[in-house]
Amino acid sequence: MKSPQVIDVINYFMDLQDRICLSLENIDGQQQFTRENIDNPGGGLSRPRALADGPVIEKAAVQFSHSLGDSLPPAATDRNPHFAGKGFQATAISMIVHPLNPYAPTTHMNLRFFLVNTEPASWFFGGGFDLTPYYPFLDDVKNWHLVAKEACDPFGSDIYTELKNTCDEYFYLPHRKETRGVGGIFFDDWNRGGFENSFAFVRSVGEAFLNAYNPILIARKDIPWGKRERDFQLIRRGRYAEFNLAIDRGTKYGLQSGRRIESVLASLPPLASWQYNYQPEPGSAEAVLYEEYLKPKDWLSM
């Protein structure tokens, strides 16, 4: 049975999914999201949405899911072993955008809510958003982080810095010794101030995403580009795939929970490449990404 808390979160996540899909369709101007409703075991629901081969968006996925189970997957209990073997409900929205233009950054956002069958019941939120540019613009990065900070500030003056640091630590490729992109905010096990306060914070993050990303995509989608930029984009997409397949807890959770594999791997780019021992030419625009952006910084003071 769905609790009132779960119902409220489900309704918000589904509404946010609809609004994100509509906004991206409007920016792309040609392609639309496919729409499916898939019943999950035990009474849950998945609403996968995918868009491909647009003039602006090469691939995007905006997924909603609500699932119920008798035992949380290991990826969800690594940090909370006392929840192992407990029944649960989980609902989430997760999205990824891979633009066609190499000057337009890839982005990711997800929000999730877990209700665990303990006595009394335990619950927590998680999620965040991050930005992965290939040819970065400092103004874009600063505005991205400014919107993130504005989403956090009503809930505590130090929350943005805390979640920004958590994002930098999580979206990191240790085998490459580089961040995946320029970060954003990321949080787990969030239940501060009670349910209403925590849910209000999650809604603030969800609304901030549209305000943060859409202006960047619109500003960069028509910049001229060629083979050099495309080749570099595909190399960097390879790094993105490495993170999602080797490190990301969300991918591991999806695989362990038995979710539909097309939905679990929808975040992967449509094309990527791995060039042996790639090194950007010194002084090039490609080198700027490595030298100035793929490391944690206080972007708001730049």
Image (cartoon, rainbow, N blue to C red):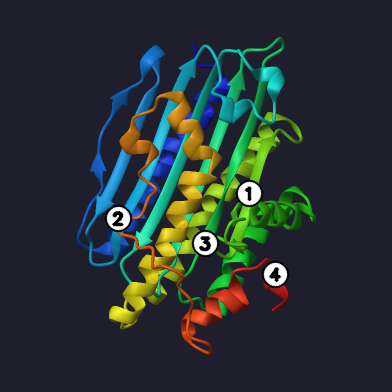
Q: Which label belongs to residue 131? A: 3
Task: State the SS at label 4.
Answer: loop
**Vertical arrangement, residue 5 with respect to residue 111, above or below:** above
Q: Earlier in the sequence, mark 4 or mark 3?
A: 3
Depth check, mark 1 against mark 4: the one in front is 4
- Distance, label 3 to label 1, CA atoms, is 12 Å
x and y percentages locating residue 182 in the rendered image: 58, 65
In the image, is residue 172 above or below residue 77? below
Question: Helix or strand or loop: what does disc 1 sit on?
Answer: strand
Q: Say which residue appears at 47% left-offset and 30% top-offset.
A: 10
**Callout 4 amino acid:** Lys
User: Up-down: is 71 above or below 277?
Assistant: above
Q: Is residue 210 above or below residue 111?
A: below
Front label number (2 vs 4): 2
What is the C-alpha distance between the residues marked 1 and 4?
16 Å
Task: Please tell me which of labels 2 and 4 falls first in the chain.
Answer: 2
Amino acid under label 3? Leu
Tell me where residue 126 appears, x and y as whole percent: 61, 38
Residue beneath label 2, please?
270
Residue to which mark 1 is pinned: 186
Cα distance between the residues tagged 2 and 3: 18 Å
